[in-house]
Image: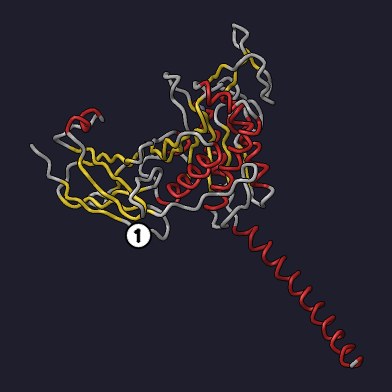
């Protein structure tokens, strides 16, 4: 009995030692594998130096945790460039803690590439040159919004016009986690060829976290905790894009919402009035509306779609807060094909495009 036990425990010890050794090897292999696989993330805090970006007015006595700024009437104000840099620094710390190689296009209140500010276009070029030169694999530009109407509020994420699937997937993932974390209105993923999106060689997105022109949004943007949530939401979007799965609790204990499940997509030609209002000559093209629905038949917002013309060319898609995706389709007789641009999702629709009228 004793003998057996001693022999067994000797065996146990050997097995344990081997297991420990194997675990160590596996761990270091995993660490090496992870380090090699993680994409280089370029973080671009919008504006800086002489370019303050949007300006928000704060209630007297608001504590922002940022350098105090005042306007000529001595009201406390919040500058977009300060908010963007703070969120970028927090995002950088979040990603670095998870092993991501990162680069910041500016780390102080100056222009892109940390050069003295000379002008917006030189500033933007310095940013994209840095990201392209350092072979970044993901580009995230951080901005805050502004509008003439004080009622405009919410979060939106941009990709360039006709952006390929990786950028669309990155944008919709970040938009989803941002909306879940910040709780602001979901304004969707939109396409617009901003300089930094057009001139970067990797999947690139531009985030507009909230509106400095909105009294409710600006009060939130002034809070360090809110900016931390914004950073973690963007980080979680990048984490999932990198194929790493669940990033764990983010935004003070919240979890990342599961990806949406699109079930069907419908295509319809918008009316002539809407087409003309969108600046499209109705003789040459139409405005089409794609609506993605989930399994319960609900309209889904911020789902990336990809549209192709009969000749195989891509069509710019712009999603709206109500979930409708607008497509400016030139009249070229044949089939218009629209599909949900999410990995593993095969939902598509076809429609016939009428020929051009002469
Ligand atoms: Zn901006």
How many tags in the picture?
1
Question: Height in image: 11 above or below 162?
Answer: below
Q: Which quadrant holds the N terminus? A: bottom right
Residue behind label 1 places its C-beta within 8 angstroms of ligand 1: no
| Residue 72 picture quarter | top right
| Residue 3 picture quarter | bottom right
Residue most extreme to the right? 2
Q: Nearer the viewer, residue 167 or 235?
A: 235
Q: Residue at x 58, y 19 (%)?
A: 50
Q: Residue at x 59, y 45 (%)?
A: 235
- The image position of residue 65, as x and y in percent, is 69, 26
- The image position of residue 245, as x and y in percent, is 56, 57
| Residue 269 picture quarter | top left
Q: Residue at x 41, y 60 (%)?
A: 344
**By what rule are the colours in the image chosen?**
secondary structure
Q: Nearer the viewer, residue 129 or 85?
A: 85
Report the side of 219 relative to 14 (left or right). left
- The image position of residue 60, as x and y in percent, is 64, 13
Residue most extreme to the top? 73
Within 10 angstroms of label 1, few (less than 14), some, or many (20 or more) residues? few
Q: Which quadrant holds the C terminus? A: top left
Q: Secondary structure at mark 1?
A: loop
- The image position of residue 272, as x and y in percent, is 17, 33
Q: Residue at x 41, y 51 (%)?
A: 165
Question: Height in image: 154 above or below 335?
Answer: above
Residue most extreme to the left? 358
Please name the residue that numbered disc 1 is placed on: 346
């Amino acid at each position: 009995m004793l003998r057996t036990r001693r022999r067994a425990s000797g065996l146990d010890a050997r097995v344990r030692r081997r297991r420990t050794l194997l675990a160590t090897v596996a761990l270091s292999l995993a660490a090496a594998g992870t380090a090699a696989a993680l994409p280089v993330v370029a973080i671009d805090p919008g504006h800086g130096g002489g370019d303050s970006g949007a300006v928000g007015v704060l209630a007297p006595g608001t504590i922002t945790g940022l350098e105090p700024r005042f306007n000529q009437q001595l009201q406390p104000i919040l500058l977009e460039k300060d908010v963007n840099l703070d969120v970028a620094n927090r995002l950088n710390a979040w990603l670095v803690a998870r092993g991501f190689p990162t680069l910041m296009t500016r780390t102080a209140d100056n222009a892109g590439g940390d050069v003295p500010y000379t002008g917006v276009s030189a500033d933007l070029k310095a940013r994209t040159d840095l990201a392209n030169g350092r072979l970044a694999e993901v580009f995230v530009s951080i901005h805050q919004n502004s509008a003439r109407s004080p009622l405009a509020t919410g979060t939106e994420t941009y990709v360039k016009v006709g952006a390929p699937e990786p950028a669309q997937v990155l944008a919709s993932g970040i938009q989803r986690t941002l909306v879940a974390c910040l709780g602001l209105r979901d304004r969707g993923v939109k396409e617009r060829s901003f300089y930094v999106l057009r001139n970067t060689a990797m999947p690139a997105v531009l985030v507009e976290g909230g509106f400095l022109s909105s009294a409710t949004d600006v009060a939130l943007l002034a809070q360090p905790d809110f900016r931390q949530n914004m950073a973690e939401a963007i980080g979680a979007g990048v984490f999932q894009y990198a194929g790493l799965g669940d990033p764990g609790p983010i935004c003070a204990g919240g979890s990342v919402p599961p990806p949406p499940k699109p079930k069907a997509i419908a295509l319809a030609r918008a009316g002539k009035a809407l087409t003309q209002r969108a600046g499209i000559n109705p003789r040459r093209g139409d405005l089409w509306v794609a609506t993605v629905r989930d399994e319960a038949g609900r309209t889904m917002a911020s789902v990336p779609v990809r549209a192709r013309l009969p000749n195989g060319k891509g069509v710019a898609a712009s999603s709206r807060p109500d979930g409708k995706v607008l497509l400016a389709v030139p009249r070229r007789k044949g089939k218009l094909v629209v599909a949900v641009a999410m990995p593993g999702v095969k939902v598509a629709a076809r429609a016939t495009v009428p020929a051009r009228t002469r």
